[in-house]
């Protein structure tokens, strides 16, 4: 499939104004760059922005027009850009036909700003809500609805969040990865694929980078770049490889690493982020950044080209000073609370029998769950066990964690089929009701979600 579908968004009349003032800052420049939300507040300690969710249209280059839902008319939505310590105020309006909320995936915000059903009532069509919080960490995060999210995220509601600390941590090429399932040029209904569809999680047939199919990244051969990636897909795990290139991981979900780590592929389960220094191939011509769909036995897709890396002549540029990007990571204390969080159900986990997905955590299916109770100030050890035939990305709201045996702050971690992952979670003084769930959105909706209560 060599056609390049160029996606453009046509906007309802109300938005032409917002977009027309399009000397708006970009997170990075270029044809497939991402715009930043405009800060309407002159106070240097405050970032105040306006956001609206509406139906919109994406025009594919092959002539099809796809109905989507979009933030400020674009897919992905414009980036929320701020610096650590700033107060962020988001005036949000819901112009969708359905209720929605916004969740700030990866930001440690107060519980009542977290956008989940346990903390916020739905924002009805025509209503608005103002989100307000201080951003505590320099990181790449993202926002998306937390209501009917398998459908709403698939429809196009997602956008990056870039929090800098003034030391260059806000820089780099931000790429939001997604895939959509198109049928006859339209996003297929949420129940497409039927029971199998929700078992597997929705794997799309069109891969998008910043809303573009196979965009072209052009640079002089041998250039070094910094890529910052978000996986916003409902269910697809991206495992990116670029023959002839070298990848060095410098940051994970929650910020920078302490020391750089060479990696063979960029492995991103749904919800995860990566910050990578990429030494691009030294030979001229087109190279494909490929993703393997190799998700064990459940794979539906083969290999796909995500991006065309076009190496030209000219003087290559060198990347950022890697050592200067590194940040010390605290050694977390020995945990005083131990828990097991066990994924079960789904196909071959017993869930096939009754027809329903029966996706469970600790034997319970959301919303009929027994909340875990935690105390601020404790450090907890969670063993996340996967008793199913599929991989599941575990995501915790409100708190960041470290995975034992690896370095870096995380909020989402890939838990392989029949495998387990051990994490250490410092329970910050951030009381409230918090969700944790599989970030394959269909699985979360079929019950693979639990609650953590912090006093
Ligand atoms: Cu990105 Cu609860 O989700
Ligand atoms: Cu989250
Ligand atoms: Cu899952």
Image (tube, helix red, strand yellow):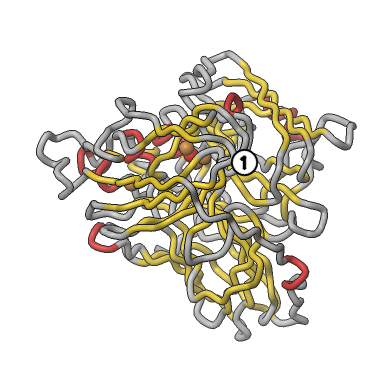
Residue 19 % position (x, y): 72, 35
Residue 261 % position (x, y): 58, 74
Compared to residue 336, the image places residue 227 above or below, namely below
Q: Describe residue 27's horizontal placement relative to residue 241 as left or right.
A: right
Name the residue located 69 percent from the left edge and 24 percent from the top edge. 91
Secondary structure under the numbered disc 1 in the rendered image: loop
Question: How would you rate the neighbour count of disc 1 (Cα within 10 Å): few for under 14, some for 14-19, many for 20 or more?
Answer: many
Residue 156 visible here? yes
Who is closer to the viewer here, 422 or 360? Answer: 422
- Residue picked out by circle 1: 107
Compared to residue 366, the image places residue 309 above or below, namely below
Task: Give the total of numbered labels.
Answer: 1
Residue 165 % position (x, y): 78, 52
Name the residue located 73 percent from the left edge and 43 percent from the top edge. 81
> Which picture quadrant has residue 161?
top right
Compared to residue 89, the image places residue 128 above or below, namely above
Q: Describe residue 248's horizontal placement relative to residue 268 as left or right.
A: right
Q: Describe residue 249's horizontal placement relative to residue 97 as left or right.
A: right
Q: Residue furthest bottom?
A: 283
Who is closer to the viewer here, 79 or 163? Answer: 163
Residue 67 visible here? no
Name the residue located 59 percent from the left edge and 14 percent from the top edge. 127
Residue 257 % position (x, y): 64, 64
Compared to residue 85, the image places residue 279 above or below, namely below
Name the residue located 38 percent from the left edge and 44 percent from the top edge. 438
Who is closer to the viewer here, 230 or 56? Answer: 230
**Picture quarter with the N terminus:** bottom left
Q: Describe residue 356's horizontal placement relative to residue 412 as left or right.
A: left
**Picture quarter with the C terminus:** top right
């Amino acid at each position: 499939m060599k056609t390049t579908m160029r996606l453009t968004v046509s906007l309802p009349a109300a938005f032409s104004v917002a977009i027309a003032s399009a000397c708006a800052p970009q997170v990075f420049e270029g044809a497939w760059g991402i715009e930043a939300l405009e800060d309407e507040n002159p106070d240097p300690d405050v970032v105040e922005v306006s956001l609206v969710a509406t139906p919109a249209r994406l025009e594919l280059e092959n002539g099809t027009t796809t109905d989507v839902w979009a933030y400020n008319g674009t897919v992905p939505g414009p980036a929320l850009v701020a610096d650590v310590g700033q107060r962020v105020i988001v005036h949000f309006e819901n112009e969708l036909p359905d209720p929605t909320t916004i969740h700030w995936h990866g930001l440690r915000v107060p519980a009542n700003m977290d956008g989940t059903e346990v903390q916020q009532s739905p924002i009805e069509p025509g209503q608005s809500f103002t989100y307000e919080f201080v951003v505590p960490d320099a990181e790449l995060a993202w926002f998306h609805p937390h209501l009917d999210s398998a459908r709403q995220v698939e429809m196009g509601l997602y956008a990056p969040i870039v929090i800098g600390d003034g030391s260059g941590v806000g820089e780099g090429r931000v790429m939001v990865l997604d895939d959509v399932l198109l049928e006859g040029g339209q996003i297929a209904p949420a129940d497409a694929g039927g029971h199998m569809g929700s078992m597997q999680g929705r794997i799309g047939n069109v891969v998008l980078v910043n809303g573009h199919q196979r965009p072209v990244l052009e640079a002089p051969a041998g250039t070094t770049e910094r890529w910052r990636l978000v996986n916003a897909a409902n269910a697809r795990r991206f495992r990116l490889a670029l023959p002839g290139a070298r990848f060095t991981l410098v940051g994970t979900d929650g910020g920078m690493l302490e020391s750089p780590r060479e990696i063979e592929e960029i492995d991103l389960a749904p919800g995860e982020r990566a910050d990578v220094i990429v030494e691009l191939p030294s030979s001229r011509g087109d190279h494909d950044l490929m993703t393997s769909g190799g998700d064990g036995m459940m794979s539906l897709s083969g290999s796909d080209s995500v991006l065309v890396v076009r190496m030209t002549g000219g003087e290559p540029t060198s990347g950022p000073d890697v050592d200067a990007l590194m940040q010390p990571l605290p050694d977390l204390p020995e945990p005083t609370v131990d828990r097991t969080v066990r994924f079960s159900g789904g196909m071959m986990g017993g869930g096939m029998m009754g027809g329903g997905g029966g996706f469970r955590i600790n034997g319970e299916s959301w919303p009929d769950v027994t909340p875990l109770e935690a105390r601020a100030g404790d450090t907890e050890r969670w063993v996340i066990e996967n008793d199913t035939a599929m991989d599941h990305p575990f995501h915790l709201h409100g708190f960041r964690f470290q995975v034992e045996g690896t370095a870096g702050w995380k909020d989402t971690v890939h838990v392989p089929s029949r495998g387990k992952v051990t994490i250490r979670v410092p329970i910050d003084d951030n009381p409230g009701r918090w969700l944790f769930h599989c970030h394959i959105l269909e699985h979360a909706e079929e019950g693979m979600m639990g609650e953590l209560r912090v006093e």
